[in-house]
Image: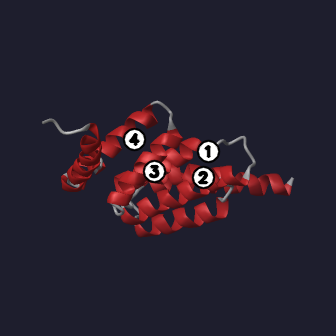
Amino acid sequence: MQPSRAAHARVLPVLALALALFIPSAILAQTQQELVRHGDALFAEARYREALAVYEKARAQAPGDVDILMRVAKSREGLWDPRSKEPANRKLLETAAGEYREVLGKDPDDREALDRYVRASMGLERIDETYAFLKDSAAKRPSDGRTLAWLALFCGMDKRIEEQESW
């Protein structure tokens, strides 16, 4: 005698639940490396919002990973529109600048983080704060040519502003 359809209907959900409980969550969840690769593909297609969401998942798995933090910041910066005056838009760049600064706190030699931090800060018109940061960085690492170049640029900007104000 064959089991009825009603018996199948009762057994299948129980079987599905049993399988779900026994399949390790590691198999179901994406690994950090898979998330980063997926985020990189989205970023390369300029799909910054989607890339940011994927990188944030990877960051949750490895909160101290500087490379993932850089990817998060770059995605956030990619969403920023320099023409927009919306507070939410400005917040994107403020957050990215903070993330670049966090990267520099963990890896002061990261050239890309330095460049992006300075450009983001300039976009936020935080000239004095950025100048103070560069002076402090140059004092700590006087042989760092990149920091010195940015500092020289800021000194030149400061001199031009003073000259314009005296006209």
Mark carried by residue 93: 2
For disc 4, the marked residue is 39
Residue 97 to residue 129: above or below: above
What is the secondary structure assignment of the residue under circle 3? helix
Q: Position of residue 155 (x, y in %)?
A: 62, 57
From mark 3 to mark 4, how far is it between C-alphas?
9 Å
From mark 3 to mark 1, how far is it between C-alphas?
13 Å
Say few, some or many: other residues with alpha carbon within 10 Å of mark 2 (under 14 / 14 to 19 / 20 or more): many
Q: Position of residue 4 (x, y in %)?
A: 23, 38
| Mark closest to the chain's N terminus, 2 or 3 | 3
Numbered circles on residues, count: 4
| Mark closest to the chain's N terminus, 1 or 2 | 1
Q: Nearer the viewer, residue 67 or 162?
A: 67
Q: Nearer the viewer, residue 47 or 147?
A: 47
Residue 54 to residue 143: above or below: above
Mark carried by residue 80: 1
From mark 2 to mark 3, how far is it between C-alphas?
12 Å
| Mark closest to the chain's N terminus, 3 or 4 | 4
Q: Nearer the viewer, mark 1 or mark 4?
A: 4
Q: Do the numbered discs 1 and 2 sit on residues whose CB atoms are within 8 Å?
A: yes
Mark carried by residue 72: 3
Q: Do the numbered discs 1 and 4 sit on residues whose CB atoms are within 8 Å?
A: no
